[in-house]
Amino acid sequence: MSNILLQLDQLSKSFGNLKAVDQLSLTLEKGNVYGLLGPNGSGKSTTLGMILNVINPTSGSFSWYQGALTTHQALKKIGAIIERPNFYPYMTASQNLKLICKIKQCSHESIEEKLILVGLWERRHSKFKTFSLGMKQRLAIAAALVNNPDLLILDEPTNGLDPEGIHQIRKLITSIAELGTTILLASHLLDEVEKVCNHVIVLKEGVKFYEGPVDEISQSFGFFELKATDRKILTDFIKTLPEVKEMKLESNHLKVFLKAELSEEVLSKKLAEANIYCTHFVKKHPSLEDQFLTLTQS
Amino acid sequence: MRLLSIELYKLWHNRISKILIFSYFILIFSIAILSTIKVEIGPINFHLADQGIFNFPYIWHFNSFMIGLLKIFFAVIIVAMIGNEYSYKTLKQNLIDGLSKEEFLRSKVYAILAFVGISTLLVFLISLVLGGIYSDYNELQIVFSDLEYLLAYAIKLFGFFSLCLFLGLLIKRSAFALGFLALWQIIEGICFGLMKWKLSDLIPSHSAEQIFRFFPLNAMGNLIKEPFSRLSAIQNIADQIGEGFTKDYGVSTLNLCIVLAWSSLFLWWSLLLLKKRDL
């Protein structure tokens, strides 16, 4: 059995003149935790809408399980949460989950287990409309897990939650990821993605900007923050170094980005040889957030 | 069966639709109340049941027409069951959970068929019982003649509910969809009036009626014509004042076909609409 769960081929969606998703090609494999990153309006939700059968693609195609199953059959083996939890407000938590089991044609047995997992077992007989947003979101996670899905798709799962709710959902996602479930997590919150994902896809204005392992995106050569009494001499010297990619002056610090390995030891030695002594000397590795911002803003 | 059970599950757990469904079926029984209407004012002794409305085979016509008027109750349920899916966004969720758009529509249609079936069966049973009590003729041959009114009843309901389903999907909001249904009725009336008025120069007036019978709501109405003027009491009065009726009260096959064609069109359009729309 192949490991490929989902393939997107040149998938595009336009709303009028606006290209929401532009020729997006992707492959999702079993066992990974994918992060779909991008600022608001970059086409994340549209992409998910298309693979989830609720938005018709303008062009391009996608296939689940390498075309072995039709989309709606495949979705029975997938769990997905999009933006807000949508349930029948007049039904209780467990009635809603039973309906989902009927649709997904899976057994009712795991309802109890999943409700316990998300901490809603005590409230199983409460109507959905009485739930708080955090509880609704947790019920949505239980609903997405009720068929023990091959792939769990989460679109902005912590949107609109209070800090405690966010914490609960994150803990839940981490524990699900540890169980080995393949996850596709769409978010604009980078630390969220950094913490759980091992693979990231960055979208910007509907175009795929970057795709690769999460440690690769943050694996750059880092940058130095330098400060010296005479800034001009420092700047002129740094310019001559072959390892330097670019320099930026940022709040009195000179930020020096590298394109090759340059250790603190080597640089300080070189500076000393040139008779330059720094008042501030730090080497930093960028967070995913810095990387993301440089990626999407450039 | 799975699709039907999904739809019934949704309806069953909704208190309002449960109440409406029950009241609809209870209202059907209320036709029996008509039989108890008795007016006694001095010498005038009027008992509705004795006026022949419950005579076989006339009762098939009378009951299917009268009970057919209750269909508007059910229209509310159908429009609401579509409108809710949109306002709760559960249509989107159903699709994500792995129901295809076609299956979604089929689950609704199956529910409609089930209710039309139950409703028709009830009309049959109630008429049989009422007729059994009050009818002057009880020969089997007469009892089971004119049963085509039941077929017309079922198709009339199905056609009407298909229209409701389509309007619900088109407009997405239950209240507006019902308003639009009323508007549709008015527009059909205006169209007919305009045709009679404007086209009368071009074509003879009866052809306006010929065209009008193809309009969906009118076609549904034509399936079972009003039964009152067929009552012998009223016929007698008409004869006395020299206005004899020569009206065809039968169920015409053409009308059945028109309504069935409209039903399939409405369902087909519903499917297209669902498929085309992004959610």
Image (tube, coloured by chain):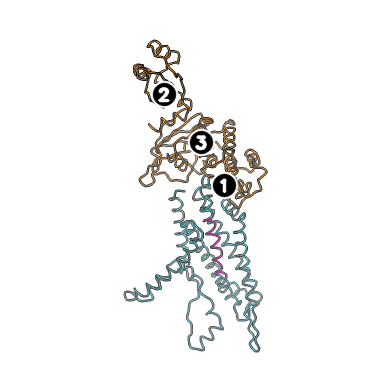
Residue under circle 3?
A185
Asked if the residues shown at circle 3 and circle 1 are in contact, with their CB atoms under 8 angstroms apart, the answer is: no
Calculate the distance from the C-alpha at mark 1 to the C-alpha at mark 2. Answer: 59 Å
**Residue type of the residue flagged with mark 2:** His
Q: Which residues are magenta?
A: B67-83
Q: Under tag 3, what secondary structure? A: strand
Which residue, as the protein is rendered here, is positioned at the far top?
A273
Which residue, as the protein is rendered here, is positioned at the far left?
B202
Asked if the residues shown at circle 1 and circle 2 are in contact, with their CB atoms under 8 angstroms apart, the answer is: no
Residue A103's tag is 1
**Residue type of the residue flagged with mark 3:** Leu
Q: Are marks 2 and 3 on the same chain?
A: yes
* Residue B17: percent from left, percent from top: 59, 59
A291 over A237 or under it: above or below: below
Q: Are marks 1 and 2 on the same chain?
A: yes
Q: Between B221 and B150, which is closer to the camera in this rendering?
A: B221
A207 over A127 or under it: above or below: above
Q: Which chain is cyan?
A: B
* Residue B44: percent from left, percent from top: 63, 87
Q: Mark 1 or mark 2: which is in front?
A: 2
Residue under circle 2?
A253
Q: Which chain is orange?
A: A
* Residue A103: percent from left, percent from top: 57, 47
Going from N to C along the chain, the mark reached first, 1 or 2, is 1
Tell me the subunit letter for badge 3. A
